[in-house]
Image: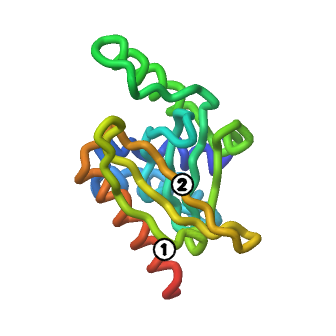
Amino acid sequence: MFDDQLIALLSINASSYSLAAIQIARLEAERRNITGDVQKAQFDAYLNSSGFAGRLILLEEQLMFLSTGMAASSSTKGIAGELHSATRNVAASRLDFSSLDNEGSWIYFLDQIKECKMISKFLSGPELQFVIEEEDGSIMNGVVNCGDLGKSEVEGLATQILAARDHLSHE
Protein backbone atom coordinates (compact mmCIF):
# COMPACT_ATOMS: atom_id res chain seq x y z
CA MET A 1 0.00 0.00 0.00
CA PHE A 2 1.31 3.44 -0.94
CA ASP A 3 1.65 6.16 1.69
CA ASP A 4 -0.99 8.38 0.08
CA GLN A 5 -3.45 5.47 0.02
CA LEU A 6 -2.79 4.85 3.69
CA ILE A 7 -3.40 8.50 4.53
CA ALA A 8 -6.69 8.33 2.63
CA LEU A 9 -7.67 5.29 4.69
CA LEU A 10 -6.63 6.97 7.94
CA SER A 11 -8.67 10.10 7.28
CA ILE A 12 -12.10 10.37 8.82
CA ASN A 13 -15.74 10.64 7.82
CA ALA A 14 -17.01 14.19 8.44
CA SER A 15 -20.33 12.99 9.82
CA SER A 16 -18.40 12.43 13.04
CA TYR A 17 -15.36 14.61 12.45
CA SER A 18 -13.68 15.83 15.59
CA LEU A 19 -10.26 16.98 16.69
CA ALA A 20 -9.82 13.72 18.58
CA ALA A 21 -10.44 11.62 15.46
CA ILE A 22 -8.08 13.75 13.39
CA GLN A 23 -5.43 13.36 16.09
CA ILE A 24 -5.83 9.56 16.02
CA ALA A 25 -5.27 9.55 12.24
CA ARG A 26 -2.18 11.75 12.59
CA LEU A 27 -0.71 9.61 15.38
CA GLU A 28 -1.18 6.50 13.24
CA ALA A 29 0.60 8.17 10.31
CA GLU A 30 3.45 9.18 12.63
CA ARG A 31 3.61 5.67 14.12
CA ARG A 32 4.13 4.29 10.61
CA ASN A 33 6.85 6.91 9.88
CA ILE A 34 5.12 8.26 6.77
CA THR A 35 4.78 11.89 7.76
CA GLY A 36 7.82 13.21 5.92
CA ASP A 37 6.47 13.87 2.43
CA VAL A 38 2.78 13.13 2.93
CA GLN A 39 0.21 15.80 3.64
CA LYS A 40 -2.04 15.10 6.60
CA ALA A 41 -5.79 14.96 6.06
CA GLN A 42 -7.72 17.67 7.90
CA PHE A 43 -11.10 16.22 7.02
CA ASP A 44 -12.62 13.55 4.81
CA ALA A 45 -16.35 13.77 4.06
CA TYR A 46 -18.55 11.48 1.98
CA LEU A 47 -20.41 14.00 -0.19
CA ASN A 48 -21.67 14.64 -3.74
CA SER A 49 -20.08 16.86 -6.38
CA SER A 50 -20.95 17.33 -10.05
CA GLY A 51 -23.62 14.63 -9.78
CA PHE A 52 -21.14 12.03 -8.45
CA ALA A 53 -20.76 10.44 -5.04
CA GLY A 54 -17.31 10.47 -3.45
CA ARG A 55 -15.00 11.91 -0.81
CA LEU A 56 -14.15 15.56 -0.27
CA ILE A 57 -10.71 15.61 1.39
CA LEU A 58 -8.93 18.67 2.76
CA LEU A 59 -5.16 18.27 2.92
CA GLU A 60 -2.65 20.81 4.16
CA GLU A 61 -2.15 22.30 0.66
CA GLN A 62 -4.99 20.94 -1.48
CA LEU A 63 -8.71 20.29 -1.58
CA MET A 64 -9.82 17.31 -3.64
CA PHE A 65 -12.92 15.37 -4.54
CA LEU A 66 -12.32 11.67 -5.19
CA SER A 67 -15.26 10.51 -7.30
CA THR A 68 -16.66 6.99 -7.32
CA GLY A 69 -17.99 7.66 -10.81
CA MET A 70 -21.28 6.52 -9.21
CA ALA A 71 -24.27 8.81 -9.67
CA ALA A 72 -25.33 10.59 -6.51
CA SER A 73 -29.05 10.56 -5.85
CA SER A 74 -30.25 12.68 -2.96
CA SER A 75 -33.91 12.48 -4.04
CA THR A 76 -34.42 8.90 -2.83
CA LYS A 77 -36.14 8.87 0.57
CA GLY A 78 -36.86 6.34 3.32
CA ILE A 79 -35.26 2.91 3.44
CA ALA A 80 -34.29 3.02 -0.26
CA GLY A 81 -32.54 6.35 0.32
CA GLU A 82 -30.66 5.00 3.33
CA LEU A 83 -29.58 1.92 1.35
CA HIS A 84 -28.35 4.07 -1.53
CA SER A 85 -26.47 6.32 0.90
CA ALA A 86 -24.87 3.29 2.60
CA THR A 87 -23.86 1.79 -0.78
CA ARG A 88 -22.39 5.14 -1.83
CA ASN A 89 -20.44 5.51 1.42
CA VAL A 90 -18.99 1.98 1.14
CA ALA A 91 -17.88 2.72 -2.44
CA ALA A 92 -16.44 6.09 -1.38
CA SER A 93 -14.56 4.59 1.58
CA ARG A 94 -12.60 2.37 -0.83
CA LEU A 95 -11.29 5.28 -2.91
CA ASP A 96 -7.63 6.21 -2.96
CA PHE A 97 -5.79 8.95 -4.81
CA SER A 98 -5.78 6.95 -8.06
CA SER A 99 -9.49 7.81 -8.12
CA LEU A 100 -8.55 11.29 -9.33
CA ASP A 101 -8.72 9.68 -12.79
CA ASN A 102 -12.44 8.91 -12.32
CA GLU A 103 -15.09 11.08 -13.96
CA GLY A 104 -16.19 13.81 -11.56
CA SER A 105 -12.92 13.92 -9.56
CA TRP A 106 -11.00 17.16 -9.10
CA ILE A 107 -8.13 18.68 -7.14
CA TYR A 108 -7.20 22.30 -6.41
CA PHE A 109 -4.43 23.98 -4.48
CA LEU A 110 -5.84 25.99 -1.60
CA ASP A 111 -4.58 29.29 -3.03
CA GLN A 112 -6.90 28.70 -6.01
CA ILE A 113 -9.95 28.83 -3.71
CA LYS A 114 -11.11 32.44 -3.69
CA GLU A 115 -14.39 31.87 -1.81
CA CYS A 116 -16.00 29.02 0.08
CA LYS A 117 -19.28 29.33 1.96
CA MET A 118 -22.22 27.26 3.11
CA ILE A 119 -25.52 27.87 1.35
CA SER A 120 -28.78 26.14 2.11
CA LYS A 121 -31.08 24.99 -0.66
CA PHE A 122 -34.68 24.09 0.13
CA LEU A 123 -34.73 20.81 -1.80
CA SER A 124 -31.10 19.67 -1.67
CA GLY A 125 -30.08 20.88 1.79
CA PRO A 126 -26.77 22.48 2.73
CA GLU A 127 -24.08 22.90 0.07
CA LEU A 128 -20.54 24.22 -0.10
CA GLN A 129 -20.33 26.90 -2.77
CA PHE A 130 -16.90 27.67 -4.23
CA VAL A 131 -15.30 30.33 -6.39
CA ILE A 132 -12.10 28.85 -7.79
CA GLU A 133 -9.41 30.39 -9.97
CA GLU A 134 -8.33 27.93 -12.64
CA GLU A 135 -4.66 27.70 -13.66
CA ASP A 136 -5.39 29.75 -16.82
CA GLY A 137 -6.80 32.58 -14.67
CA SER A 138 -10.46 31.90 -15.46
CA ILE A 139 -12.95 31.79 -12.61
CA MET A 140 -15.14 28.73 -11.95
CA ASN A 141 -18.13 28.46 -9.65
CA GLY A 142 -18.64 25.05 -8.08
CA VAL A 143 -20.99 23.39 -5.62
CA VAL A 144 -20.58 20.32 -3.42
CA ASN A 145 -23.83 18.89 -2.08
CA CYS A 146 -23.67 18.15 1.64
CA GLY A 147 -27.24 16.89 2.10
CA ASP A 148 -26.18 14.13 4.52
CA LEU A 149 -24.67 16.69 6.95
CA GLY A 150 -26.24 19.34 9.15
CA LYS A 151 -25.83 23.06 8.49
CA SER A 152 -23.39 23.51 11.39
CA GLU A 153 -21.21 20.64 10.10
CA VAL A 154 -21.14 22.18 6.61
CA GLU A 155 -20.29 25.59 8.07
CA GLY A 156 -17.48 23.84 9.95
CA LEU A 157 -16.13 22.37 6.71
CA ALA A 158 -16.20 25.80 5.02
CA THR A 159 -14.43 27.35 8.00
CA GLN A 160 -11.73 24.65 7.95
CA ILE A 161 -11.14 25.10 4.21
CA LEU A 162 -10.74 28.87 4.53
CA ALA A 163 -8.59 28.56 7.66
CA ALA A 164 -6.28 26.08 5.92
CA ARG A 165 -6.03 28.39 2.89
CA ASP A 166 -5.27 31.42 5.06
CA HIS A 167 -2.73 29.50 7.14
CA LEU A 168 -0.94 28.36 3.98
CA SER A 169 -0.80 31.90 2.58
CA HIS A 170 0.90 33.18 5.75
CA GLU A 171 3.70 30.60 5.71
What residue did someone put label 2 on? 142
- Residue type at the position of mark 2: Gly
Seen from this angle, which residue lies furthest bottom?
Answer: 170
Separation of disc 2 and disc 1 at Cα? Answer: 17 Å
Residue 76 rendering spot, x and y as whole percentages: 38, 19
User: At x 47% / y 69%, what residue is drawn?
Assistant: 115
Measuring from the top left, give residue 95's x and y in whole percent: 59, 35
Q: Is residue 20 left or right of residue 49?
A: left
Q: How many marks?
A: 2
Residue 133 visible at all: yes
- Residue that protrudes farthest toward the front in the picture: 122
Q: Which mark is residue 165?
A: 1
Q: Residue at x 40, y 45 (%)?
A: 12
Q: Indicate the amino acid at tag 1.
A: Arg
Where residue 64 is drawn, which disc sits there? none
Where residue 87 sits in the image (x, y, percent)? 46, 20
Q: Is residue 23 visible?
A: no
Compare residues 37 and 54 and report the one nearer the observer.
54
Front residue (pair 32, 145): 145
Scheme by which the image is coloured: rainbow
Marked residue nearer the N-terminal end (2 or 1)? 2
Up the image or down, 84 lies above or below 148; here it is: above
Q: Between 124 and 109, which is closer to the camera in this rendering? A: 124
Q: Is residue 116 above or below residue 126?
A: below
Tell me if residue 126 comes above or below residue 60 in the rendering. Answer: above
